[in-house]
């Protein structure tokens, strides 16, 4: 009789519903949030495209390529791949191993382990022939993911070990609304239970449970950047992202993330996850041209514990999202007329404008500083760009079938001045009769050219003010008032407020009073013993030498 009772109890455990199934433990076996870059941003990744889109939103694969390995520990790791076909589409593959151990439940602890395989495909809607030429659909990506639960195990105190299999489907879309922002949405585990044999975890000893569906919607924006961003900062980027995450087995979550890129290779990340609890994730990354490393410090909600994960990514150069657009920087125009540009980097010029001309391949549109250039029947263009003093950044952009490539050129416009001594010296050189006299004049000409270059730099930076029609005299003496003005501008000093008369000859309303106060406070120039400053007096040789000495000249 006793043996019979034990047998009945054992059979009831086997055939009855699980006391703590995956859903009751808070586990969604096909809810996959891995990858150090997304985790470092709090998981707010629905509207961002990279190889991690295989897990977060397959619509992002339309702009993705690369291979990524993520390691947390030997029981939690993943392999991801996004392989582009060169036509704005990518096929994704993922293999993951996920383990939860020591999960508390009513009569003990539970351990869950799973191996998952994902096959994804993401493409732009302009892959459809009828939509091919519509610009709207070139910015619209759609994707699908087939997820297979190859092996699911569940071990619990007081229960037999169980295993299961199952499969489901994800759908996702991304809309690149502008060059600097995007929006995305993803539906995870969309199949109703037992639809075509999917949508459920099927246990080995009978029984099944549905796979909880979830929906996420979010957006991202590049707030700071050197191209197509509201705030311009060269070689720096700030991406902000946010999303709302709805799930059937847990409280809805609000996720906010940020990524700061600097020095052309470093990343800092942070994210906030707000739901039942509010927590902060942190991340960092290092990126070279074709590979990168990312780290994340995040909280796993199932056990409410923190973990560190590391991802190693590789982006093969031969894998291109769009094959039809050349990616090499155009060369300086010489004799070759195809796909070339009349620009060099780091140009220095005196002109207030620069003419840019070149030729592009058929079908390619070219933009200069965001404005379209008109092409003639030979696909040649000519554009005149105005220049301001100091640095100018000229951005040349080529667009083809929804894709684009951008090149940046730096142009420095210097102020041009007329030097009286230079004009006089040219006349003397023409009149020189002996070789010795000519050599002496040529040496002096080089010295004047060197000084002129320095003066032009000062004028360009606004240290010295000269009207375009005036001539600058190198050997002319400068007044103490002029020197005070130049020193303040050269040193970038803050101009102080003058509330009272400074000296007998410098009342508070004198136009040079703020500059004179600044240099006397800094003890760069001193007043005279009789209580005057004498702004119109010439600078003495002793004063000039002292000033040059203090400024390291």
Image (tube, helix red, strand yellow):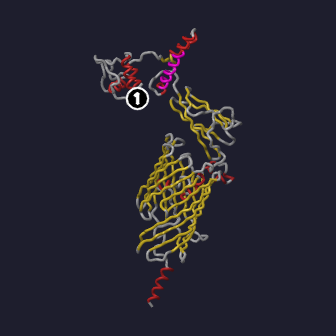
Given the current orientation, which residue lies at the most extreme front position? Answer: 436
Whether residue 201 is visible: yes
Q: Quadrant of the C terminus?
A: top left
In the image, is 517 to the left or to the right of 247?
A: left
Given the current orientation, which residue lies at the most extreme bottom position? Answer: 1
Disc 1 is placed on an element classified as helix
Given the current orientation, which residue lies at the most extreme left position? Answer: 530
Query: x%, y% of residue 269?
Result: 46, 51
User: Is 222 part of what is drawn in magenta?
Assistant: no
Give the main secondary structure, helix, strand or loop, of the magenta stretch.
helix
- Residue shown at 42%/71% (left/top)? 109
Whether residue 484 is visible: no
The boundaries of the magenta stretch are: 442-457
Query: x%, y% of residue 252?
Result: 46, 61
Query: x%, y% of residue 463?
Result: 44, 25
Tell me the crowding category of disc 1: few under 14, some 14 to 19, or many 20 or more residues within 10 angstroms, Cα based: few
- Residue shown at 66%/46% (left/top)? 324
Q: Nearer the viewer, residue 527 or 219?
A: 527
Relative to 188, say whether 472 is above or below.
above
Counting the numbered discs, the total is 1
Q: Quadrant of the N terminus?
A: bottom left
Query: x%, y% of residue 400?
Result: 64, 44
Relative to 357, say whether 454 is above or below.
above
Q: Which residue is mark 1?
A: 491
User: Is 445 part of what is drawn in magenta?
Assistant: yes
Relative to 226, say whether 4 is above or below.
below
């Amino acid at each position: 009789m006793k043996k019979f009772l034990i047998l009945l109890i054992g059979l009831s455990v086997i055939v009855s519903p699980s006391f703590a199934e995956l859903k009751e433990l808070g586990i969604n076996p096909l809810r996959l949030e891995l990858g150090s870059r997304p985790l470092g941003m709090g998981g707010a990744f629905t509207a961002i495209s990279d190889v991690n889109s295989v897990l977060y939103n397959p619509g992002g694969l339309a702009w993705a390529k690369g291979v990524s390995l993520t390691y947390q520990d030997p029981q939690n790791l993943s392999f991801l791949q996004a392989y582009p076909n060169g036509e704005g589409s990518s096929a994704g593959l993922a293999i993951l191993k996920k383990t939860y151990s020591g999960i508390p439940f009513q009569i003990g602890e539970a351990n869950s382990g799973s191996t998952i395989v994902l096959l994804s495909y993401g493409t732009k809607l302009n892959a459809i022939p009828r939509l091919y030429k519509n610009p709207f659909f070139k910015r619209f990506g759609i994707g699908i993911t087939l997820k297979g639960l190859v092996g699911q195990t569940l071990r619990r105190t007081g229960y037999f070990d169980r295993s299961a299999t199952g499969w489901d489907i994800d759908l996702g879309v991304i809309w690149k609304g502008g060059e600097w922002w995007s929006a995305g949405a993803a539906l995870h585990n969309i199949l109703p239970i037992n639809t075509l044999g999917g949508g459920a975890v099927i246990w080995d000893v009978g029984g099944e449970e549905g796979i909880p569906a979830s929906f996420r919607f979010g957006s991202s924006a590049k707030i700071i950047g050197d191209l197509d961003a509201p705030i311009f900062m060269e070689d720096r980027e700030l991406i902000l992202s946010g999303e709302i995450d709805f799930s059937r087995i847990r409280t809805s979550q609000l996720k906010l993330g940020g990524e700061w890129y600097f020095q052309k290779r470093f990343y800092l990340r942070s994210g906030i996850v707000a739901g039942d609890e509010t927590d902060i994730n942190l991340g960092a990354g290092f990126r070279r041209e074709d590979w990168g490393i990312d780290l994340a410090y995040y909280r796993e909600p199932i056990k409410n514990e923190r973990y560190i994960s590391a991802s190693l990514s590789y982006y093969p150069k031969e894998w291109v999202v769009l094959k039809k657009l050349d990616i090499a920087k155009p060369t300086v125009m010489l004799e070759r007329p195809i796909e070339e540009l009349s620009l060099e980097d780091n140009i220095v010029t005196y002109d207030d404008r620069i003419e840019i001309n070149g030729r592009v391949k058929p079908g390619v549109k070219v933009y200069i500083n965001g404005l379209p250039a008109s092409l003639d029947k030979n696909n040649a263009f000519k554009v005149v760009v105005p220049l301001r003093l100091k640095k100018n950044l000229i951005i040349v952009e080529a667009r083809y079938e929804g894709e684009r490539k951008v090149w940046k050129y730096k142009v420095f416009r210097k102020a041009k001045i007329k030097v009286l001594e230079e004009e006089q010296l040219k006349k003397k050189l023409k009149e020189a009769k002996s070789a010795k006299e000519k050599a002496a004049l040529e040496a002096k000409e080089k010295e004047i050219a060197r000084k002129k270059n320095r003066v032009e730099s000062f004028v360009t930076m606004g240290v010295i003010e000269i009207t375009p029609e005036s001539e600058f005299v190198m050997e002319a003496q400068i007044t103490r008032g002029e020197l005070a003005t130049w020193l303040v501008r050269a040193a970038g000093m803050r101009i102080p407020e003058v509330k009272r008369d400074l000296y007998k000859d410098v009342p508070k309303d004198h136009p040079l009073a703020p500059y004179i106060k600044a240099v006397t406070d800094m003890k760069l120039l001193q007043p005279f013993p009789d209580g005057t400053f004498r702004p119109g007096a010439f600078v003495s040789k002793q004063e000039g030498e002292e000033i040059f000495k203090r400024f390291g000249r």
